[in-house]
Amino acid sequence: MPDHAIIIDTDPGIDDAVAIFTALASPEIEVLGLTTVGGNVPVAQTTRNGRAIVALAGRHAVPVLQGCGRPLILDPQTAETVHGSDGLADLDLAVPDGPAAAAHAVDWIVETVAGRPAGSVTLCALGPLTNVAAALVRAPDLAERLAGIVLMGGSVFVGGNTTAVAEFNMAVDPHAADIVFRSGAALTMVPLDCTHKALMTNRWIEQIDRLGTPVGHAVAAMLRFYQRFDMERYAFAGGPLHDPNVIAYLLKPDLYAVRRCHVAVEITSPLTRGMTVTDWWGRFAGAPNCGVVHDVDADGFFDLIAQRLADL
Ligand code: BDR
Ligand code: CA
């Protein structure tokens, strides 16, 4: 019996792909489905990528539902420079024949959670929060029906990666993020403060390649492409593997340090829009609404991901 039943809301995206593979490989996790959102690339492509990832993992029964194609208010913003023109390093992964699922991701999230016992489904959000916010608007009781929402996004002390203060998922749809952070759902945020503490090494990527499987080869090729961006831009020793931290946190929370804080998303100022304003000292805002994951055992994290990828 898996410990977690999850929905992965995602914009694959190379690090999203690694997160999805890790979840699909983990017996502690039942992946109920992927819901796609526009983010790293437009939503039609994130849906194709989601279907290709599930197929490469041999998990054809996991449904992939297409969601929102644009942020709530702002114009779309994508990240092909980081992820490649197709979002997955232009590897041209095979997409299964046949039509995509007909239901809309937002409907499917609401109906899937309503159809299961309260508190039994965790929503893992790896992209802009447009679908999640739309689902919470459509069915406000979703906030209390979910076991929780674990999301990759935001930053506390390290600055942004899309503006000086905003992380990509927050910058793309800050208005959706604002709805999510004010929803009352049990939130856990995995910000850049955590993900920048676990940087890949070429040796680790080679270890993944040496798995000798189609998934191992594809992941290694994607990661070689992906990590050059952060290494060049920030002079990092390796690329941060953001989104898999969400899945690793579910699998092994002991790898992480978490502090409960009040977090609000700036939506008004053009200068700081998308900033996750965090009351780190618990003195200036309301009661904590979020667990802020701020540190990680990097070796434990990379060992876990490598172990799980070996099982696909
Ligand atoms: C986030 O932005 C995307 O490019 C990644 O997939 C990740 O979700 C990191 O800022
Ligand atoms: Ca992502």
Image (cartoon, rainbow, N blue to C red):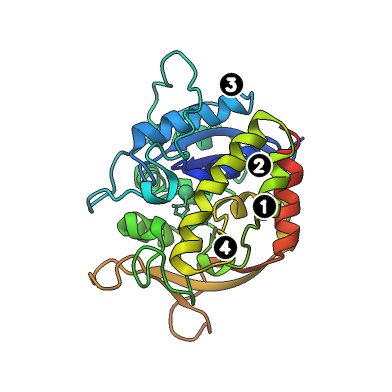
Q: Quote the CA–CA distance across marks 1 and 4.
A: 12 Å
Label ID, residue 60:
3
User: Residue 248 at x, y = what percent?
Assistant: 67, 52
Label 2, secondary structure: give it: helix
Mark found first going from the N terminus, 3 or 1: 3
Crowding around mark 4 (Cα neighbors within 10 Å: few <14, some 14 to 19, many 20+) is many
Q: Amino acid at mark 4?
A: Thr
Name the residue nearer the viewer: 137 or 105.
105
Disc 2/disc 4 C-alpha distance (Å): 16 Å
Residue 174, by quadrant, is bottom left
Asked which secondary structure carries label 4, the reply is: helix
What residue sits 50% from the left and 69% below the top?
235
Residue pointed to by mark 4: 195
Q: Is mark 4 within 8 Å of ligand 1?
A: yes
Q: Amino acid at mark 2?
A: Thr
Residue that appears at 43% across and 28% down: 48
Q: Which residue position is annotated with label 2?
A: 22
Say which mark, if any, is on residue 248. 1
Spatial CA span between label 2 and label 3: 16 Å
